[in-house]
Structure formats: structure tokens, C-alpha cells
Image: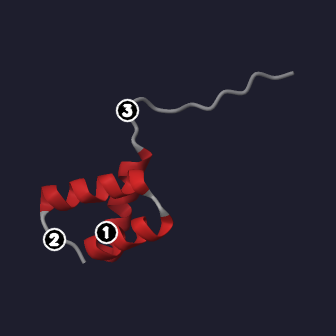
Amino acid sequence: MSDVRMYIPPNKDYQADFAQRLVNAVGFENAIRECYENQWLGTLVHVQHLQHRYGQRGR
């Protein structure tokens, strides 16, 4: 039996990365709507943080 371990880099926040890509692709308003529709509450927090940090800049 082999011992397989997945390497996860330290301090990597995949939801934050996904939120950034989502905002870049569709803008803040649509990203927030998608998060609510798909119940991506963790991602929603990151999208709202980006919105607060950068304002309404985006698509």
C-alpha cells in the first residue's frame, strides 16, 4: 500500500484566488449575484472584501 500525500502550499487561500478571478471575469455585481445563487458564502466574503478594498472598479 502506498502512502500518497497531497502537497498543499502554506498560506494558500484558494477561495480568495477564485474570488479575484471571478471579479475579474464578471465584475463585482455579477460576482456577488453568482455567490448568492450558488451559495458560495466563503467566496462571497472575499468578493465583498475586494469590493470594499478597491471600490466598484472592475467590469
In the rendered structure, the answer to whether residue 23 lies left or right of residue 39 reads: left
In the rendered structure, the answer to whether residue 23 lies left or right of residue 14 reads: left
SS for tag 1?
A: helix
Q: Position of residue 52 (x, y in %)?
A: 15, 58
Say whether marks 2 and 3 touch (CB < 8 Å): no
Q: How is the image coloured?
A: secondary structure
* Residue highlighted by disc 2: 57
Name the N-terminal-most of marks 2 and 1: 1
| Disc 3: CA contacts within 10 A as few (<14), some (14-19) or many (>=20) | few
Say whether marks 1 and 3 touch (CB < 8 Å): no
In the rendered structure, the answer to whether residue 1 lies left or right of residue 14 reads: right
| Disc 1: CA contacts within 10 A as few (<14), some (14-19) or many (>=20) | some
Say whether marks 2 and 1 touch (CB < 8 Å): no
Q: Position of residue 44 (x, y in %)?
A: 35, 58
SS for tag 2?
A: loop
Q: Nearer the viewer, residue 19 or 36?
A: 36
- The kind of residue on which mark 2 rests is Arg
Q: Residue at x 12, y 65 (%)?
A: 55
Whole-number angstrom distance, CA of label 2 to CA of label 1: 10 Å
Up/down of 32 relative to 10, above or below = below
Whole-number angstrom distance, CA of label 1 to CA of label 3: 22 Å
User: Toward which corner of the image does residue 36 lie, by quadrant?
Assistant: bottom left
Name the N-terminal-most of marks 1 and 3: 3
In the rendered structure, the answer to whether residue 25 lies left or right of residue 58 reads: right
- The kind of residue on which mark 1 rests is Asn
Up/down of 29 relative to 35, above or below = below
* Residue highlighted by disc 1: 24
Q: Residue at x 46, y 32 (%)?
A: 9
Q: Mark on residue 11?
A: 3
Name the N-terminal-most of marks 2 and 3: 3
Q: Position of residue 43 (x, y in %)?
A: 39, 55
Classify the position of the N terminus by image quarter: top right
